[in-house]
Amino acid sequence: MDWGMKNRLSKIINPKDGHTVMLAVDHGYFMGPTTGLENIKTTTEPLIRYADTLMLTRGALRNYIDPSAKIPIVLRVSSGTSIVGKDLLHEGTAVSIEEAIRLNVAGVAYSILVGAPFERDTILGISKYINEAENFGIPVLAVTAVGKDMAKDERYLSLASRMAAELGAHIVKTYFCKDFEKVIETCPVPVVIAGGKKQPEEEALKMAYDALQAGAIGVDMGRNVFQSTDPVGMIRAVNAIVHRKFSPKEAYDLFKSNKN
Ligand code: 5RP
């Protein structure tokens, strides 16, 4: 692994503890102005100081994020469908590696949909992207999206996560599940969990804690932060779990105290 790749990975994963809080605001590429992302600038400005990286699209980066911002970027480079289309998450390469380099990103994110009728497109798509990204020392985060009729269970998530790692992804993003440690044990690269649909803050914090306990290196959380009743309180609490070894109760107390 060359110096450049290591340097970029150190911007995504904090070298002090090997953990990361990724704030995901890339949802607009297939969900449009989803609740909480009506204006990504106003949403993210109070949050980014508590995140290690920001995951978003090139359009969001160009139009909402100040070029002087110090936050390392993980750029969403796959797309191809929308929530009103028929083949949700049937994605392919949408942003070139040259564009990612021009935008000075620390890494890129590419979704695969294992088990979908079009899985081959996404598997070959990420593989080809990794080939190019390796040429420039750009780490690839594989997003193991889950089709609507697939169970987010340990067997499926172990399959999708291991496949992503075998295809060459440097980091895997997947979902938390029962027996999550089995997903971790069989995935040879670092794993972060997506937050998934909005749930009560106390439950989301417990999930983040349990994922870290099982061996995840952190979170790539979006809706459970920017749709929280107190997004700043929530990302502070998530950061405390990921980087300061807070318990779920301590983190939830921090969340509640933030409002005051
Ligand atoms: C959407 C994504 C999101 O980045 C990922 O799901 C994290 O966001 P959330 O915590 O809201 O699930 O990849 O396709």
Image (cartoon, grey):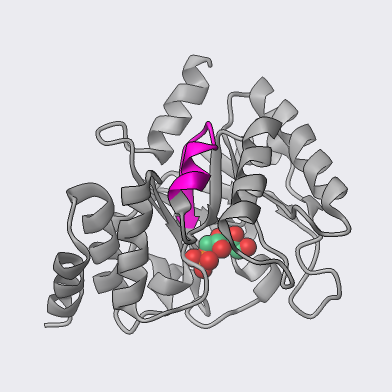
Q: Where's the C terminus, which quadrant?
A: bottom left
Q: What residue is shown at x 28% (from left), y 56% (from top)? A: 49
Asked whether the viewer can see residue 63, the reply is no
Q: Nearer the viewer, residue 184 or 60?
A: 184
Image height of 215 relative to 232, above or below? above
Q: Position of residue 227 (x, y in %)?
A: 43, 79
Q: Nearer the viewer, residue 213 or 24?
A: 213
Q: What residue is shown at x 74% (from left), y 27% (from top)? A: 131
Chain part drawn in magenta: 181-193
Q: Quadrant of residue 234?
A: bottom left
Q: Nearer the viewer, residue 133 or 151?
A: 151
Q: What residue is shown at x 60% (from left), y 68% (from top)? A: 27
Q: Nearer the viewer, residue 173 or 125?
A: 173
Q: Is residue 11 left or right of residue 158?
A: left
Residue 183 lies in the magenta-colored region: yes
Asked whether the viewer can see residue 211, the reply is yes
Q: Is residue 212 left or right of residue 195?
A: left
Which residue is farthest top?
A: 2
Q: Position of residue 138 (x, y in %)?
A: 58, 30
Q: Please state the quadrant of the image where ligand 1 appears.
A: bottom right
Q: Is residue 174 left or right of residue 206?
A: right
Q: Is residue 196 left or right of residue 168?
A: left
Residue 158 lies in the magenta-colored region: no
Image height of 30 relative to 103, above or below? below
Q: What residue is shown at x 74% (from left), y 40% (from top)? A: 126
Q: Position of residue 119 (x, y in %)?
A: 83, 52
